[in-house]
Image (cartoon, rainbow, N blue to C red):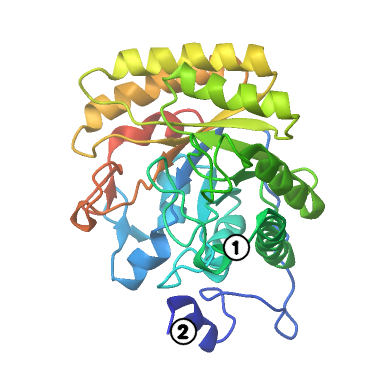
Amino acid sequence: MAAGAMLMACGCTEESPVTVHPEGWEPATTVIDRSKFAHGADVSWVTELEHKGYTFANEAGTEKECMELLRDDCGVNAIRLRVWVNPEQGWNDIHDVVVKARRANNLGLRVMIDFHFSDTWADPGAQITPAAWAEMDLTQLKEAMAAHVDEMLSALKQVGVEPEWVQIGNETRGGMMLPLGDLDAHFAELVDNGYAAVKAVFPEAKVVVHLDCGDQLWLYTRMFDKLKTAGTRYDVIGMSLYPDPSNWSKTVDDCLKNISTLATTYGKRLVIAEVGMDYREADTADAMMRSLYAGCTASGVVDGIFWWEPEAPAEEGYTKGCFDNGHPTKALDVFKENI
């Protein structure tokens, strides 16, 4: 049985998915402050890590829930969450995302939803159409995509969570849901389809188109020239940036130059939707983040910066988080100092 299904069997609680209103239950009414620069973290892994027994603690050794720790001890005010269509083990499906989004909302944290439109990771090396959609033609694919967006966002609306940003695809430099959604095929049409589906549920949500390598201008002009020509609707340009410790300064400088160029050329706001560096390079990561933060806030066109999976344990195979043995390093100190 999938993890999401197992949780549903346990009933609707604060710690399990909520898809219908239990008797006497009311949606959350937490007031969310959307006025400040977003100090973000993608913690999509957190429920799976908790299921495996991982815990998190602050510098004093006080154990806390991950999002609460990030808010209270790292200055984080926004959470990013990925959505998969039919993941094999249930993690990151609609039910799991509702759990995490409701938890974030109840802590007063802003929310970004990141649709991968896949059953698993979508990135430049893999943009695999969900298995249930694989044989669909373009019309059917658009209908399935819109229904998926509607189901996810309506579930959030039902529990009182209003996402501030919604990504249509993840690191889509070559398109998404290949082959129909290839950049040179129907990608622009699918983005526009996703935009309409988002706005139908949350008219104020900012729709993001997200690419990797924020320091590589050519990737962005190639993509956004095509979207401009097609008349595709979107609100925000999203970037990933993973500087190498050996040359991080040039990478950040190039990214900041690109931000200025893109804002001028396309008239859009931007967000650093992902950033990361090896957790063992805490001093370098701290310097990198201070430089990136200063440049982004000074630009006047960037909504925020999101560290990708700060809580990630190295023993799970990913080393670009910024926790060491369950404790935050100094990589997010710039957030804490600019609350």
| Percent coordinates x, y for residue 144 in the rendering | 67, 62
Taking the spot 50% from the left edge, 82% from the top edge, the residue there is 5
Q: Is residue 12 above or below residue 68?
A: below
Q: Position of residue 231 (x, y in %)?
A: 76, 29
Return the mark for residue 25: none
Q: Secondary structure at mark 2?
A: helix
Label 1 Cα neighbours within 10 Å, binned few <14 / some 14-19 / many ≥20? many
Alpha carbon separation for disc pair 1 and 2: 19 Å
Residue occupying image coordinates x 51% and y 53%: 81
* Image-quadrant location for residue 152: bottom right
Residue type, label 2: Met
| Residue where numbered disc 1 is placed | 102
| Residue 225 locus on image (x, y percent) | 63, 21
Q: Amino acid at mark 1?
A: Arg
Residue beneath disc 2:
6
Dot 2: within a 10 Å radius of its alpha carbon, few (fewer than 14), some, or many (20 or more) residues?
few
Q: Residue at x 20, y 20 (%)?
A: 246
Q: How many marks?
A: 2
The answer to whether residue 36 is visible is no
Q: Nearer the viewer, residue 217 or 273?
A: 217
Q: Earlier in the sequence, mark 1 or mark 2?
A: 2
Residue 77 at least partly seen = yes
Q: From this view, report whether residue 136 is shown above or below residue 273.
A: below
The image shows residue 48 at horizontal and vertical percentages of: 37, 67
Q: Going by the image, does 13 lie left or right of 251?
A: right
Q: SS at mark 1?
A: helix
Q: Look at the picture and state if 240 lies above or below 80.
A: above
**Residue under the image location 25 percent in, 54 percent down:** 313
Question: Is the N terminus in the top left, top right, bottom left or bottom right quadrant?
Answer: bottom left
**Relative side of 150 to 58, left or right:** right
